[in-house]
Every structure is written in C-alpha cells, then in structure tokens.
Amino acid sequence: MDCEHDSLKAGSKTGLKRRRSESVLQPASSSDLNRCDRPAKSRRGEPPIWANTRQQLVDALDWYHSMQGGAALSDKRCTGFLLDGDNGSRSVMTDEVIITRVGGGSTKDSQGNLTLQRDQSPDGNLVAAMMTTMRERRPVGVIIGSRNKLLDIDIPHRYCVLDWFLITNVWSEKFGSYAGYRFRLEKLDWSKKGWWTAPDAEQVSQASMHGDSNLGPAERMCAECGKFSQQIYAKPGWMCLQPSCSQFWKVGGSEPAEDALFEYHPTFLNQRLSTQPGIPDPGPLAQIFDKNLSSSQGTTSREEWKGIVCPQCHKCIQRITWDAWDCSNDPARAPSETCRYRAERRIRAVPLLSVTEGAKAFRSNQLACAIKPAVDNLTCAPYEMRVYEVPGGGWVTHFAANPQINESSNGPNFLFDRLQVINLGLRRYPLTNSQVPGTLTCHFAVNYGVPYKYVVSVDSRGFSEAPAEILTALGRLSWATKIAVGRSGGEYQPPNELLALGYLEQMKIGFHDDGEKDLGPTIATLSLGSRSRMFVRMKAKYHYGVGDKGVPTRDDPILPGSLKEQERRALRQEFEAGKLTLPQYRQQLTSLVGRSGKKEPPKLLQMELKHGDLLVMHGAELQKYFEHSVQPDHGLRFALTARYIETTDKTDLEKGSFRLQEDQVYGGL
Ligand SMILES: O=C(O)CCC(=O)C(=O)O
Ligand SMILES: [Fe+2]
C-alpha cells in the first residue's frame, strides 16, 4: 500500500490540509494564476498533451468536448474531466487518486468560492452521467488547469492532460445547506508514475499495483434508513450518505461543525479498483502523428479542420489557416514557445456539382417565414428579386440566380472554381466577444479593402493586392447594392471593403450583426458553392424588452412584432406619465414578459441561399435591432460580402480604393 496517503487530510471549509506541506490552500482567484504560496515541488516529467486554450483541447481531443464546466459528456457518459480552479472543499489529489466535486448547480460567492444554490439531483445530467460512467467502468481522460491548487507543482501550461482515470465512487455530501455530489477518480495504469508526481515519489508497491485485498470493504449500514454507505472519512467518522435519510451527513446525530477536520479513510483513499477485469482499454490519449508524412492534400470534411496534437511539442493545435496546421500560429502562444511545426495542406479542389447536386430540398417549415417577400421577376431578370420588408428594420433583398447567370463569363461557376485554386489568405480569427477567451470563429475569413473590425478583428489587404476574382465579385456586389438601395429610396455608397468567408463542412456563422460604428447601412453578399440557410431574428433584448438578467433594455423602441408589444407600450405610457415608479415599471415589465430574455427569439426570416445568389441587407436598424446567421449544409461554400465603411484614415482609404477592369464591371445579364 502506498503509505504516502495514509493520513491525508481533507480541508475544512476554509481550505485543505495536506500532510506533505501542512499548508492551507486558499481558493484560487484569477490574479494568482499559476502562483503558489509555497515553493513549487519539482515534477517527474512533462504532460503528454497540453494546450493554451480550452478550444484547442476541444478541437484536438475526441474525449473532451466541453467549452464550459469541468465534465465533458457524450451520449450521457462522462468522457473527460478538467480540474481547474474551483474544486470545492475537501478535494484532494494524490499520485493516483483524485477526489473532487461533480460541479454544476453552483454560483460564486463574494470570495469567488463556488457555493450550491440547491440540492444537486442524482437525476441531473452531470450526476447521472458520472454514475453511468462509473457503473460501466469507462475510462475518463483527466486534464489539469493551471488554476488548480491541489498539486504543489508548477503546472507547466494552462491546460495539461494527466492520464486516463476510472470513476470509482460517486456519492453525496453536504456543502453548506445543500447536498451535492462528489466523486473519486483513480489512475487507470499504476505501473508508471504520472508526470505530475515528485521525482522521488515511491514507486507503487506490488500490493497496490494488483489491488490490496486485505483492505476489506469499509461500508456500513445506516441504522435509520437501512442503506449502505462507504466510510469516506476516518475523521469525523462514518456518516450515512443518503440525502433522503434524516441521518444524512451526521456523526452521532449531528452534522460536523463548519471548521471540522476531515481526514480521508485510508481504505477509501487507497482502494484499487482499476485492476478489476472488464475495463475497456481506452487506447492512447490522442493519435499523435506527423501530418507531413500523410497526404499533403486535404478534403473539405470536418476531419480537415479538427485540431491535432503537435508531433513535436505535444500542444493541441487548431486548424487556423486554410492550408496548414501551424504550431506557431496560435493567438494564445506564450513567449516561451519556440515550436515551428507546420504541415502544409492544400484543400483538393471540389467540382461545383458535388456541392450543388443531391441536396435534399428543405421542408416547408424549414423555410417558413413570418414576412412574405414582394417577388419581382422582371426588373433584374433572369434573377428573381425577393424583397422582404422587416418591420422596424429595413429591407432584405434576395437576388436568386439561375444556371444562365451562374454559367455566364466571369460568373459564379468560374468564381467558385477560381477561389479554390488561388491563395486567398483565409484563416480563423479569435471571436471578439466570446465568453470563453481564445474561441475561434467557425469559418475562415480574409478582409480586403478598408479594415473591418466588427465580428472579428481581421487584418486587411488593400484592393490593389487583391486577386482579380475579388474585384470581379466586387463588381457584382456593387450592382446588386445599387439596385437594392435604389428600390428602397436610400443613398447608394459604393463598397470599399470586402470580407471573404470560407466554410468547410459543418462550419457556419452564428447570430451576429454587422453594425459597426462606421459601417454604412448596406451589406451585400455573393454566395458560392454549398446551399445554406440564412436566418434573421430580432435581438433578444429588443424582442423581450429585458436583458437576460431581467433588466429593462435601455432605449427600447418596442419594435413591431416584439413580444407583448401593445402591453409594453401601455406600460411605458403609464411610466412616462408618472403613474409608475422606475422599480414598479421594471417589476411589471419583467413579469409581463416572464423574464424570458434567455430564450431564443423566433426567426423572422429563413432564406435558402443558393450558389450564385446575391443578398443585400439595407437599413441601419436591421443591424441595430436584428441579427443574422448563416448555416451552409452541403459542403464547401464561399461568401463574399461587400460593405461601405466611413473612414478618413488615409492608409485605410487607399486600401479601399479600386478600379474595375471592363470585364469586372457588372450590369446584370
Ligand atoms: O456567409 C454569409 O452568407 C454571411 C456572412 C456574414 O453574415 C458576414 O460576413 O457578416
Ligand atoms: Fe453578417
């Protein structure tokens, strides 16, 4: 048995006591990232896989698909677990065992500690998945984050993979006033010490390696409920762990004091369950191989833009550039990183027919629309022009193409083929307002002309450096913009910026607006390749009139079609007439809309964008109060979007100026 753990003490509410250093660990805060109060111990080795951001892990590891929270679930099982800052009280980590909280159902108190707000249910997704995974004895990949304080080593990177572990126990305990779940993880392979252990840590004894049968079960039956509970703690002693029992979490009839000392029972801590037969072999934590040794041509499949583990430095690297995996191309790269691994991948050109043929027609409800378009088959024939007037939000004009348009010289078919062979410089950028720092867009982008900074901050190349195809597209976009704006009586401003987006399979652009401060009110897009669906909806804060925390939206115009529009207007009038105080107005508004600000507002427009189609959004309100998203559904797609950006910056103006060749000017067919 590994004696190191014999008298391991779990912390009281104020922290954790551990025999090695007897120091008290305070809850981690973001300011003490990577810093310990005592000198860090040296460690035996390096992590087999690591990452700087959460999305790097998620992109490269099949078993860790979770952008928030600790547990990664798949098919109602837990496949991976991240131990970062908030482990909760009584958590411990030894060389082979981790005991921590299941997580979920908590909020942070004023000191940043996670506290439960209600009892955690055994039927909740997380707890149920933990239990199923334990019962089925499925190995779980474990990652440690640098905010974790359970180990007194310097954790070398923001996220480091530990190893495969087994969930051996899941049980309930009391945290403050509520019952929550905790679990015990045991390293699957004890034949090698983990990289995180001290270089001089004792090797695991033969008895522990094979399971120590002398330990015997430390279980007792509760005299009150008749159910068995394991003895987790030597101090304060055995407790019934059935939350429904009146004796739950009690020793001798009363609950342990807030500052009681908890000491794990050696039998519980050192039991070895991972030697039992029937545990599936999880294989390697990731396939690590040099992509330079496989084909240098890629496909447009999802596999192509997954992350890989760098064969040289073992960092999870994302597919950031269109045509390479490049370890140095990491926006979160630390100054100490020197790896230059790069695997070039040209995406094999796909014929247009492979993305336009064979798509199943959308069902009518997939395109059902609250707003009916005015259809005009004459003005721009053979384009069919569909004009949607969005109440309170301007116009969306859809120019639906046909084969005659697509096959014409310099037309959409030609552009689709060409964009696949020229080097556009497409790459993924970090999202600016993401909740999880470092999250990259789910599409590739490149900006030409005046720099455009809204959705993502994209470097810009001047139109003088742009491939001819970009200017050809600009000619068509200018034509559509002029017609759409003219029809709605607006003032035409020629575009000076073009954003090209590239979508591989399963990529998309989520809901966003294009309402940058200096951005003109008109945005035109040319779709090439895979068919896609575009959605337009009112922003939640205007649809509901309250934000997701229930606070009324400032300057809410109460748009036509917004939720409880009439009632909201009446309430507003009462408030403005002084019949309601501000708190009364807020309270009545919130109860009127049912604090539904978190639910997704309904989609007002659902349009099918096909190869060759042009789409123009016109009206500043369309960007201010509404948002749009696009979901390609059948493979490779490019979207070329032109805008007018107001600027006085000389360099930017120069970047945005262009002259079209005669064959790039477009006047319709
Ligand atoms: O892919 C598209 O069609 C739309 C792109 C878009 O919304 C944008 O570039 O802002
Ligand atoms: Fe957009």
Image (tube, rainbow, N blue to C red):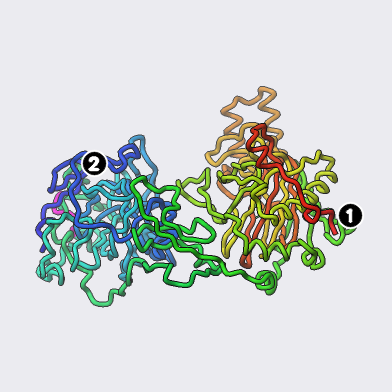
Looking at numbered disc 1 in the image, what kind of residue is underneath it?
A: Thr
Q: Splitting the image into 4 quarters, where does residue 44 fall?
A: bottom left
* Foreground pick, 571 / 609: 609
Task: Using a 10 Å C-alpha cutoff, classify the residue at mark 1 as few (fewer than 14 neighbours), some (14 to 19) or many (20 or more).
Answer: few
Q: Which residue is mark 2?
A: 36
Extent of the magenta region: 231-236
For the point 75% across and 46% down, the residue is: 659
Residue 104: in magenta span:
no
Q: Is residue 222 left or right of residue 325?
A: left
* Foreground pick, 151 / 554: 151
* Foreground pick, 108 / 342: 342
Q: Is residue 366 visible?
A: no
Residue 525 percent location from the top left of the image: 71, 53
Q: Which residue is mark 1?
A: 379
Looking at numbered disc 2 in the image, what kind of residue is underneath it?
A: Cys
Residue 624 percent location from the top left of the image: 67, 39
